[in-house]
Amino acid sequence: MTVVAEARRAAPARPSPNPAVQPKRRWSLLIGGLLSILLCAGIFAVVQLQGDARIQVLAIARAVAAGQPLTADDLKAVRIVPDPSVPLVKAVEVDQVIGRSPAVPLAPGTLLAESQLGPASWPATGQAVVAAVFKPGAVPAGLAPGSHALVVTVAKSDVTGTSAATSTPQPVAGTVVDITEGTDGTGTTIVSLLLARADATKLAGAGTDMSLVLVAS
C-alpha cells in the first residue's frame, strides 16, 4: 500500500451539508430584504409628507354676488402653500361656510378668506353698480367680470333753431361685475359695472348709445 493511499484513509471525512440549513438561510435573506424595502418606503413617505407644505383650502368655483348665500356648488377645494398673513378658509370647514354670504362679489378662482364673509358691504361708500345695455358689436371680446373698462357714450346733437351743438361726454371708467345676454332678442348685452356714484347716475340715463373699451388693469 502506498503512502498516498494511507494518507487518504487517515484523513477525516468532510461532513455532508445539512439540507435543512440552506432553506433557513434563504428565508432569512428574503425577510431581511423585504424589511429593508419597507423601511426605505416608509422613510420616503415621511420625507415627502414633510416636504409638501401645501394644504387644502376653499376657492370659488363660480361667480358669487355679494349677499348671495354660498352653496356646495359655489365652492371647490384647492391645494396651496399657505401665507400666514392671509387667513384662508380650510377645505375641512366647508360645512361651516355653506349658507353664509360674502360681503363682496367673488370671482371664480378666488381663494376664500374669512374676512370676505359677512353682511353685504358692497358697493362701498361713494360707489354704485349700474346695469348698462349695449347694442351688438359694442362689447369687446375678452370682457369678463373683473375687467377694467371705459364706457364711451355716442355723441348726441342738440338742435336749436338752425344751429346744431354737439356734446361729447367724457368716457366713464368702471369695473365689470357681471355680463348677461339681453332677453329682447336683438343681440343686446347687459353689463353690470361698478362706478363712482356720480358716474353711475350719468350712465343710467345714457340709453343704449354706448360702447365699451377694454383697458389694462
Image: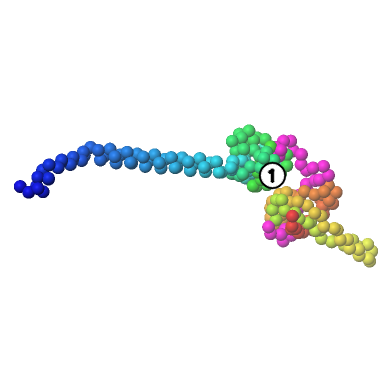
Question: Measured from the top left, where is residue 56 in percent x and y?
Answer: 59, 41
Quadrant of residue 135 within the rendered picture? bottom right
Is 157 magenta? The answer is no
SS under mark 1: loop
Say left or right for 168 vs 59. Answer: right
Question: Measured from the top left, where is residue 170 in percent x and y?
Answer: 85, 58
Asked whether the viewer can see residue 102, the reply is no
Give the vertical position of 155 relative to 57 (above or below). Answer: below
- What is the crowding at mark 1: few (fewer than 14 residues within 10 Å), some, or many (at least 20)? many
Say left or right for 45 vs 157. Answer: left
Give the vertical position of 85 relative to 185 (above or below). Answer: above
User: Which residue corresponds to the image point at 75% horizontal and 51% vertical from the top-left?
Assistant: 175
Is 118 magenta? The answer is yes
* Quarter the C terminus occupies: bottom right
- The three-letter code of the residue at mark 1 reads Leu
User: Which residue corresponds to the image point at 12% horizontal and 45% vertical from the top-left?
Assistant: 7
Judge by depth and name the residue closer to the eye, 4 or 60: 4
User: Which residue corresponds to the image point at 44% horizontal and 42% vertical from the top-left?
Assistant: 40
Quadrant of residue 66 within the rendered picture? top right
User: Which residue corresponds to the image point at 61% horizontal and 44% vertical from the top-left?
Assistant: 80
Question: Measured from the top left, where is residue 179 in percent x and y?
Answer: 70, 51
Give the vertical position of 198 relative to 18 (above or below). Answer: below
Judge by depth and name the residue closer to the eye, 39 or 7: 7
Magenta extent:
115-142
Residue farthest along the bottom direction in this orientation: 162
Question: Measured from the top left, where is residue 216 in percent x and y?
Answer: 74, 57
Q: What residue is pinned by disc 1?
A: 106
